[in-house]
Image (spheres, rainbow, N blue to C red):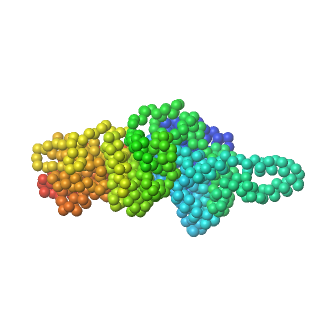
Amino acid sequence: MSELENLRSPDDLRTLSPRRVRALAEDIREFLVDSVSRTGGHLGPNLGVVELTLAIHRVFSSPRDSIVFDTGHQAYVHKLLTGRQDFSTLRQRGGLSGYPSRAESDHDVVENSHASTALSWADGISRARLLAGDTDRYVVAVIGDGALTGGMAWEALNNLADSPDQRLVIVVNDNGWSYSPTVGGLARYLDAVRTDRNYERVLGWGKRTLQGAGAPGRLTYDALHGMKKGLKDVLRPQQGLFEELGLKSIGPVDGHDLDALDAALRSARGYAGPVIVHAVTQKGRGYVPAESDAVDRFHTVGKIHPETGLPVVPSRFGWTAVFGDEILTIARSRSDIVGITAAMPEPVGLAPMAREMPDRVIDVGIAEEHALTSAAGMAFAGMHPVVSLYATFLNRAFDQLLMDVALHRAGVTITLDRAGLTGTDGASHNGMWDVALLRLVPGLRLAAPRDEETLRTALREAVAVSDAPTVVRYPKGDLPEPLPAQGRMAGMDVLARAAGDGDARVLVVGIGPFATTAVDVVARLKDQGIGATAVDPRWVIPVPAGLVEAAADVDLVVTIEDGLVTSGFGAAVREALAEQGLTVPVRAHGIPHRFLAHASRGQLEEELGLRPQDIARDTAAAVARDQQGIDITSAPRPSTQP
């Protein structure tokens, strides 16, 4: 039986000999490669923190001591050590979350998988305990060098430096990567610290030479050791950054050396105040395909062959690749186009442009707020920035979009990858908030393309706008089959028409990936003798005047979206009709006002009643009630099945 199979809790871990802990580390790496290759997930980050997580759990006592993981995608080892060893349904409905989850374990604290938040969480927890007189419990915050590029982390560090009594240990997991290699001044600083060995060499020489020279030598060594702050300033001047803030700093320490980690963490635990432990780790450690991957060290993988790291099913050409190809084409013809990414050039599709035009793609680190305001400044100076983000991360920069970009009528384009239902990454990664949020921004225009051609067209139309923000949103994954328009109506693409047997006329509006659903709904309504037309306005914020015009001639409008139904596109259509004095009922289908548990996109669509058969059934029932004189204006209720 392996060491991992014998482990049931962190208490068991603390009884193991160093030899057995090292054997456990190898067991864990083997388990991670075998398990994650079957399900997909965050492999590289977790391979890099095996020894680090083991050391933290050996020195601190979770859950009495709270362990907070920034971002949380590197918490798989933590899950294994806290009794969760069934990874067979990782990130699948009913299985383990890909991030920490309070519903799973008392050992988990923060579920939000957005970066740069852990230090603020840790500050709040430790400060509250200090105020309550609870001074014998510790908080350990594990934050990567990539997350330290986020401004919120430095706001927390600034605050912590003014509170010297908190029992707080900050572990900097420094592997030189976020999704991609970490960039910026902080990255250069940590790289210098990571590679500079002058300080250790001088102290090592002093210890060997002077302590072996009798009493005078020992006295000299003690004097030099007492001057170690001065030695640091001379031999490693860059090491002083954290200490200049007033925070004790230990390291850098080898993040794969269990003895060194144990000593550093125990030293930090014994210090009565906030301490930073700088641990140097290797992303993808121990798995050759990950170590050899120049893109992101297998940050996230789908199902792969564990022997080679090759995907079981090769990925198809997806939305992100289309954006990457089209923005590069546009940039070749327009010298004012500049790409901006928040530490994710490859995941959001800017990598091809960055390779060909490195000076025109700016990676700001995990700093979405800075990205938007910097874009406003670039627009003022004559450029047209294209800020590419995952949809869920736009939430972090709403104020900057509103007050810096929109208020100043800046010509900035924002592309939102993974908009709508992303599924397996869970509540924090579904890009379901953007439409509801962006409706609040005066002057903003938003497009939701349905296929490759409309994505390319929307992007070109977006960058042609120079006096207002534009947004292009698209989902995660593979491209659908092309869905050509059959004609135009009131400025909208007509995708399908069906004449009915009676007088009922239904306008079905599907945005983005739900344009295909709208076509299927029309076909199902036709089978029931109900006349219907499926349209795609493509630009959906503000509600097109043509949609209001078309709605005036029908008996029912049905909208389908993968955003919040309570304040999203369907709600906007209802309000636009009301402003024109039109009483046409609107049945809005979308995501209810709640967080969604992790599951596949198909499972979520079924749960939320967003399949074609669900919407066609609801629409037919509404038509029948209308013909009976019954009010049909109330919104449909999504399925509540688990």
Q: How many marks?
A: 0
In the rendered image, the residue lying farthest to the left is 502
Q: From where the camera sits, is residue 71 visible? A: no
Q: Residue at x 33, y 39 (%)?
A: 480
Q: Position of residue 323 (x, y in %)?
A: 39, 43
Decide if residue 318 is on the left or right side of residue 47.
left
Q: Position of residue 366 (x, y in %)?
A: 51, 52
Depth order, front residue of 569/44 = 569
Q: Quadrant of residue 350?
A: top left
Q: Position of residue 286 (x, y in %)?
A: 59, 37
Q: Residue at x 36, y 46 (%)?
A: 459
Decide if residue 206 is on the left or right side of residue 542.
right
Q: From where the camera sits, is residue 365 visible? A: yes
Depth order, front residue of 505/306 = 505
Q: Position of residue 221 (x, y in %)?
A: 82, 54
Q: Residue at x 24, y 48 (%)?
A: 492
Depth order, front residue of 219/325 = 325
Image quarter where the N terminus lies is top right
Decide if residue 300 is on the left or right side of residue 53.
left
Above/below status of 463 relative to 159: above
